[in-house]
Image (cartoon, rainbow, N blue to C red):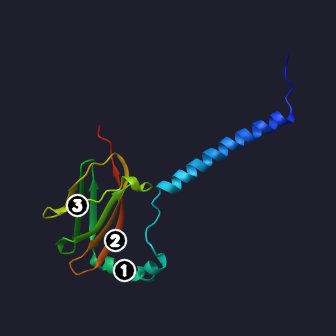
Amino acid sequence: MTREFTGWHMLALMVGGFGIIIAVNLTLAFNAVATFPGLETKNSYVVSQNFDKDRAAQDALGWDVAVALTETDLTIEITDANGTVKPKVVSAILGRATYAGADSFPDFTWTGNALHTSVDQDPGYWNLRLVLQAPDGTMFRRRFPLTVQAAE
């Protein structure tokens, strides 16, 4: 005996199919919002008022910053027209671009020509958000996108 395919069957298929799609989309959207740090500053208006002045002060330092990240080491070399610069590290956050749970706060030591710290990083894309203070008190803020290659 064969059953007849009715409009109710079609409605059930459509509701079930679209229900699955909507449930998956909502789950993915919730996880994206829950894991993305997203906040760069608490009050963007206040920061914007001094942006040009702060950028000009940073550019006036004339710093050339080289950042190297491997699975075990993070090194920052800073030079200017006079040679090597030893800044004060105000803050440093090493983490994934989209997941705050992997953030670490490296504690740098001065090697005589660079800032260095040991790390334990998985291969992939990382961001170093760095705030330094120059010897003259000028604040230097940068985000460095980095890549750790998998060991072969």
Quarter of the image for residue 98 reads bottom left
Q: Which mark is residue 107?
A: 3
Write down the residue under mark 2.
141
Quarter of the image for residue 99 reads bottom left
> What kind of element bears circle 2?
strand
Give the residue type that dot 2 points to: Arg
Residue drawn 21% across and 61% down? 108
| Left-right relation of 89 to 57 | left
- Mark 2 or mark 3, whichever is nearer to me: 3
Report the number of discs.
Answer: 3
Picture quarter with the C terminus: top left
Write down the residue under mark 1.
54
Report the residue that reaches farthest toward the left.
112
Label 3: how many Cα within 10 Å (few below 14, some 14–19, many 20+)? some
Q: Position of residue 30 (x, y in %)?
A: 55, 53
- Mark 1 or mark 3, whichever is nearer to me: 3
| Left-right relation of 54 to 24 | left
Give the residue type that dot 1 points to: Asp
Residue drawn 61% across and 44% down? 24
Q: Position of residue 46 (x, y in %)?
A: 45, 81
Q: Which label's residue is closer to the chain start, 2 or 3? A: 3
> What kind of element bears circle 3?
loop
Q: Which mark is residue 108?
A: none
Residue drawn 63% across and 45% down? 23
Q: Position of residue 54 (x, y in %)?
A: 36, 80
| Picture layout, residue 140 above or below residue 21 | below
Proximity of marks 1 and 3: CB atoms separated by less than 8 Å: no
| Picture layout, residue 87 above or below residue 149 | below
Label 2: how many Cα within 10 Å (few below 14, some 14–19, many 20+)? some
Give the residue type that dot 3 points to: Asp
| Picture layout, residue 77 above or below residue 146 | below
